Amino acid sequence: MGANSSTISELSENDYLKKLSGTETISENEPFWNQLLSFTFCTPTNSADSKVLEEATINICKALIENNPRTGNLGSLIRVLLSRTKELKISAECQNQLFLWQTHNALFIISCLLKVFISHVSERELINHFSYHQTEPGTYESDVEDLLEELLFCLIHLIVEVPLLDITYNVLLEAVTVLIVFLSYQLFHKEIIHESIIHKYLMHGRCLPYTSRLVKTLLYNFIRQEKSPPPGSHMFQQQADGGGLLYGLASGVASGLWTVLTLGGVGSKPTPQQDQSSPLANQSLLLLLVLANLTDAPDCPNPFRQSITSFRNTQDSSVPPSPSAHSFQINFNSLYTALCEQQTSDQATLLLYTLLHQNSNVRTYVLSRTDIESLVLPILEILYHVEDRNSHHVYMALIILLILTEDDGFNRSIHEVILKNITWYSERVLTEISLGSLLILVVIRTIQYNMTRTRDKYLHTNCLAALANMSAQFRSLHQYAAQRIISLFALLSKKHNKVLEQATQSLRGQLGSDDSPLPDYAQDLNVIEEVIRMMLEIINSCLANSLHHNPNLVYALLYKRELFEQFRSHPSFQDIMQNIDMVISFFSSRLEQAGTDLSVERVLEVIKQGVVALPKDRLRHDSGMRQSRKRNETEREDSHGALVPWSQTQREIS
């Protein structure tokens, strides 16, 4: 590096980097730093280029790890950065591009170095590296650990104080990136890190008063989705579609960390490359999620999580009953718009989940929106394209639906929103359908996909729990949605009969042989019967609470009435079958009275007349569904705390 442009292939032989990592001590006052930081660079824009960059610099970084205890050059580089950032805000206001350029380059070099340091040394050793000075080998000053805190404070101060302009865009991006890299120690530990000096500095002392401002700034970076400035808008070279110079590396670190914090990457597929036209928004969101998931300190809760869970709408003038020290106000309308538009990325879906689950102000606002389809449709599209998504992305989308369907107002309103021409739904042309019916179709499709592919009982339970939450509020179900409900029950019934037959044959075969153990068909049968019972509860709840609103469901029920005969006398389903059996008998009788060779229109007319004539007291309204719903909510609450991988709850259902 230096005054001339560099390419990745030249870095391993760069004289300035060799001197930085060598055995010669470099004071922070030497002109060497101006020479080191005066470089332009072709930005890595993909993982392949990023890997080449890492491979080209790994030996230099390892040399610095070896020699820094004697030279203290890492500390000198940090002090050079700190001296420049003190006047960074003024430099931005005065359009001092040279000053900003060198600050950016310093941040870039520190990011590259830190990535290797963190992957090769412990946190305690890293702190020692910050404190090594030009003294005898292996010695360091006892009071200079504050250099790490000073750097962390400097990065936070830079992010919240420096205005976002074309000339500051990449400086802010690299500052966010350095913080992400600092927090990447979790990547190299199987167990959750409960005590960390880096975490302590971020959650205590000088950094603590800036908690709410940092969270607010990161959120606004996400909301604004500012694109990377075009070439020529600043002095240092930058590709139009790229991010900061370390964007690819840090994005990998942050994305990996997000996987660790959610589901550990179990069963995951690579996420399709997202549009990175706004790398600052993407990196800010990743940093926000990492900060929110830091473990609480022994003496105080995570202030970043407190801030994220307590911020309010700018239009909310009420005084909260128990105000948080780290709360702030932000424009909820802008936040809602950004969340709706960015659901193609799994990190945006995780942010939406976090806010709906933990911030009651956001949840209340979202549920009050009259354009709720703007949020629900992107979530449904994630579930619809389940085979193309990471498992954790699908999981979070499903939990979001589960949270939304806990609200009765939401369950009513989605059946009042009429959609036209849903182009991404390819199984059938849907020229007009309610949002509620579309939600049912997508969730049922997810269940059927899970039955044939992943076979995860936990996913089944949550899909059915969402349908159960909605069932009492089903209104004017689309005929195709009603058909799919009964078709799913038919598929489950077929699987039940298959497993029952296998169990019977296996038992007969074992009577004459004691050589091999009996397969555990009983467990498989219990799992399927549990799912069947949930389906029956969903149908029963709809019949008991909104029969007069759903003639299409009654029609589908009558068309496949033979499916339910085998469960009428089954001890596990007798209680839940009473309403279903009564409805089938009542409407079958009326259809027989109406004659034969009835058209579809005539059958629906008879059903609508029968609904009016059916005495309301003949339908049982018991607490079975309510208890089932409460049970599934409890299971979901348990999952929130641990965010367990699918593999830990996996069980065969076929």
Image (cartoon, rainbow, N blue to C red):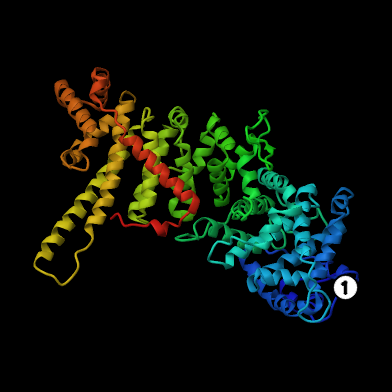
Q: Secondary structure at mark 1?
A: loop
Give how far across and how far down residue 231 sits, in percent: 77, 55
Name the residue rendered at 24%, 34% in the picture: 557
Residue 360 shows in the view: yes
- Numbered marks: total: 1
Q: Nearer the viewer, residue 233 or 634?
A: 634
- Report whether 212 appears left or right of 158: left
Q: Quadrant of residue 487?
A: top left
Give how far across and how far down residue 360 sits, in percent: 56, 37
- Report whether 1 appears left or right of 566: right
- Report whether 525 appears left or right of 346: left
Residue 169 shows in the view: no
Q: Nearer the viewer, residue 291 or 123?
A: 123
Amino acid carrying label 1: it is Ser
Name the residue rendered at 78%, 56% in the picture: 154
Name the residue rendered at 74%, 53% in the picture: 207
Q: Is residue 498 above or below residue 22?
A: above
Q: Mark 1 sits on what residue?
A: 27
Q: Residues within 10 Å of mark 1 (few under 14, many from 20)?
A: some
Give how far across and how far down residue 265 sits, in percent: 49, 60
Give how far across and how far down residue 294 sits, in percent: 61, 55
Residue placed furthest toward the front: 299
Q: Nearer the viewer, residue 417 or 638?
A: 638
